[in-house]
Image: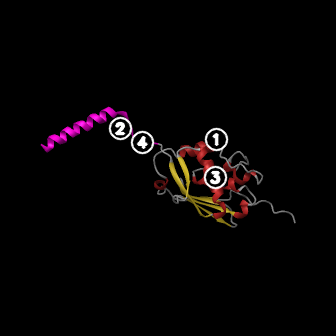
C-alpha cells in the first residue's frame, strides 16, 4: 500500500515537472558575477575613495562586483612613504597600499583605481597616456583620469569570466607585487 502511494506521488511530481519543463531544466547562469569583498578598515582616510573606485570598476566591467566590507578578498591600507603598490595573491585577491604622500601629489582616486586594477589582473603599462589607467604615474601628476580604458575594462571582464569565486581563486598561485607605479614628483625648488 505504502509503495503504491509513493509511486503515485512520483508520477504526479514527474508530471508537474514535465509541465514546468524549461524552468526546472535551466541551471543557474554560468557567468554569475564574482563578489570581491574589499576592506578599508586599515585605510580610514581613503574609504570613500575606495568606494568610488569600486563603483568605477563595477560600472566598467561585468563578471565581478566589488563590495565594501563584506569580507577580505582585498585589504586596503594607507601608508606613509615607500610608494603606493599592490600585492595580488591571486586574481581578485590581495592587498593595496596607498601612500599618503603620493596621494597628495597624484589623484588619489586614480591611484586607487590603478592599484585595484592590479588585483583585477592588469599589469602596468607606462606609456604616458592619461587615457590608460595602468599608465599610472607615467602620465604625470596632472593626469587625474580614474577610469580604465575600454580595452582595460574588457580585459578584466574576460579574466573574470567563469564560475569560480574570488575566494576559490585565492588558492591558485603565488603573489605578484606591482610597485613603482607612481614616480616621485620633482622636489620643488626652494
Ligand atoms: Zn601599477
Whole-angstrom CA distance, mark 3 to mark 2, is 39 Å
Counting other residues with Cα less than 10 Å from the Cα at mark 2, is it few (<14), some (14-19), or many (20 or more)? Answer: few
**Residue beneath disc 4:** 28
Mark in front: 3 vs 2: 2
Q: Which mark is residue 24?
A: 2
Q: Secondary structure at mark 4?
A: loop
The magenta stretch is 1-30
Question: Which residue is at the far left?
Answer: 1
Instruction: Indicate which disc, 3 or 2, sits on the residue closer to the N terminus.
Output: 2
Q: Distance between the Cα atoms at labels 3 and 1?
A: 16 Å
Name the element at disc 3. Answer: helix
Q: Examine the rendered structure and indicate whether residue 188 appears above or below residue 29.
A: below
What is the magenta segment's predominant secondary structure?
A: helix
Q: Residue furthest right?
A: 190
Kindly report the distance in space between the C-alpha atoms of the residues bearing marks 3 and 4.
29 Å
Question: For residue 5, what is the image quadrant?
Answer: top left
Per the image, is 47 magenta? Answer: no
Locate residue 71 relative to residue 96 in the image: left or right: left
Location of mark 3 (residue): 53
Are there few (<14), some (14-19), or many (20+) residues within 10 Å of tag 1? Answer: few
Q: Which residue is mark 1?
A: 150
Across and down, in percent, residue 59 comes to 60, 45
Residue at position x 22%, y 36% in the image? 11
Amino acid at each position: 500500500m505504502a509503495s503504491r502511494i509513493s509511486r503515485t506521488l512520483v508520477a504526479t511530481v514527474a508530471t508537474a515537472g514535465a509541465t514546468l519543463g524549461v524552468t526546472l531544466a535551466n541551471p543557474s547562469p554560468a557567468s554569475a558575477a564574482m563578489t570581491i569583498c574589499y576592506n578599508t578598515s586599515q585605510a580610514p582616510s581613503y574609504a570613500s575613495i575606495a568606494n568610488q573606485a569600486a563603483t568605477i570598476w563595477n560600472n566598467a566591467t561585468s563578471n565581478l562586483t566589488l563590495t565594501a566590507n563584506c569580507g577580505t578578498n582585498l585589504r586596503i591600507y594607507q601608508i606613509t612613504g615607500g610608494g603606493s603598490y599592490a600585492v595580488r595573491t591571486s586574481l581578485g585577491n590581495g592587498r593595496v597600499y596607498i601612500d599618503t604622500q603620493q596621494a597628495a601629489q597624484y589623484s588619489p582616486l586614480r591611484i586607487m583605481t590603478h592599484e585595484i586594477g592590479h588585483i583585477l589582473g592588469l599589469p602596468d603599462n607606462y606609456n604616458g597616456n592619461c587615457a590608460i589607467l595602468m599608465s599610472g604615474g607615467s602620465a604625470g601628476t596632472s593626469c587625474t583620469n580614474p577610469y580604465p580604458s575600454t580595452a582595460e575594462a574588457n580585459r578584466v571582464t574576460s579574466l573574470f569570466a567563469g564560475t569560480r569565486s574570488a575566494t576559490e581563486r585565492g588558492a591558485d598561485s603565488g603573489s605578484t607585487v606591482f610597485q613603482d607605479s607612481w614616480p616621485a614628483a620633482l622636489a620643488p625648488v626652494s
